Image: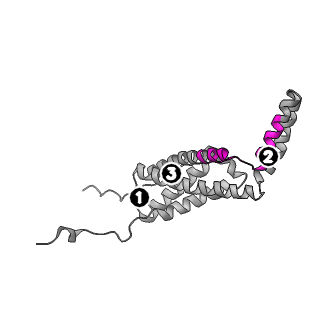
Amino acid sequence: MSDPDSFRVEPAEKPDDFQAMLIGAALVYFISIIPVLGLTVCCCIPQTLGALLAVYWYTNKYKITISPGKGIVLGILTALLGGIAAYITGFILLKLGFNPMGDMMQGVLEQVIQMAEENTSPEEAEKLREQIERALSGEKTAIQIVIDLVFTVIVNAIGGVIGGSIGAAVFKKAPPAAPAV
């Protein structure tokens, strides 16, 4: 008698989602660290696009259709990888004194301070000025860092869910149905 395992056919290449995650995470990372485009992080746009790219790459490379659950997991991991890398890079750059967002926002914040000086008491306006200067200096307490990191994880997870689920629904690579006889 023959062994039932002898009839099992192994795929030529076992699907590996790590390469797809790295490619999608790179997109999340680069969109997130570019100052003007980085503003889209709160809208989950970089994370959604990165997750979509990862699902597309994965399904296209292996010519497979994935379940919505697999798409969501792939999307979340992709977005977290890229988003946390961007957060760490931004934190390091801030500590080195490079704060392009702060420089870009300086003019807008000066207008906010001027409006506060005109519409509130001098003490309130001075408090606002101190808070803005502290925020622009990049000095953060440990609690602020933890809060920022938690916010980063939540936003990236949401974007990953959105992109992964849409990608799994759109990028289907199932073989065509057999023609009717």
Residue at 47% across, 48% down: 165
Between the C-alphas of marks 2 and 1, the distance is 45 Å
Q: Mark 1 points at which residue?
A: 173
The residue positioned farthest toward the left in the image shown: 1
Horizontal side of residue 2 vs 121, given as left or right = left
Residue 75 place in picture, x, y as percent: 50, 52
Q: Name the residue under label 3.
A: 76
Reply yes or no: does residue 176 show up in magenta.
no
Answer few, some or many: residues within 10 Å of disc 3's Cα (few below 14, many 20 plus, some between 14 and 19).
many
Is there CB contact under 8 Å for labels 2 and 1?
no
- As helix, strand or loop, the secondary structure at mark 2 comes to helix
* N-terminal label among 3 and 2: 3
Residue at 69% across, 55% down: 91
Residue 120 place in picture, x, y as percent: 85, 27
Name the amino acid, label 3.
Answer: Ile
Depth check: 153 or 168 in front?
A: 153
Q: Point out which mark residue 105 bears.
A: 2
The residue positioned farthest toward the front in the image shown: 142
Reply yes or no: does residue 139 show up in magenta.
yes
Answer few, some or many: residues within 10 Å of disc 2's Cα (few below 14, many 20 plus, some between 14 and 19).
few
* N-terminal label among 2 and 1: 2
Residue 108 place in picture, x, y as percent: 82, 42
Residue at 21% across, 71% down: 6
Name the amino acid, label 1.
Answer: Lys
Residue 105 place in picture, x, y as percent: 79, 46
How many tags in the picture? 3
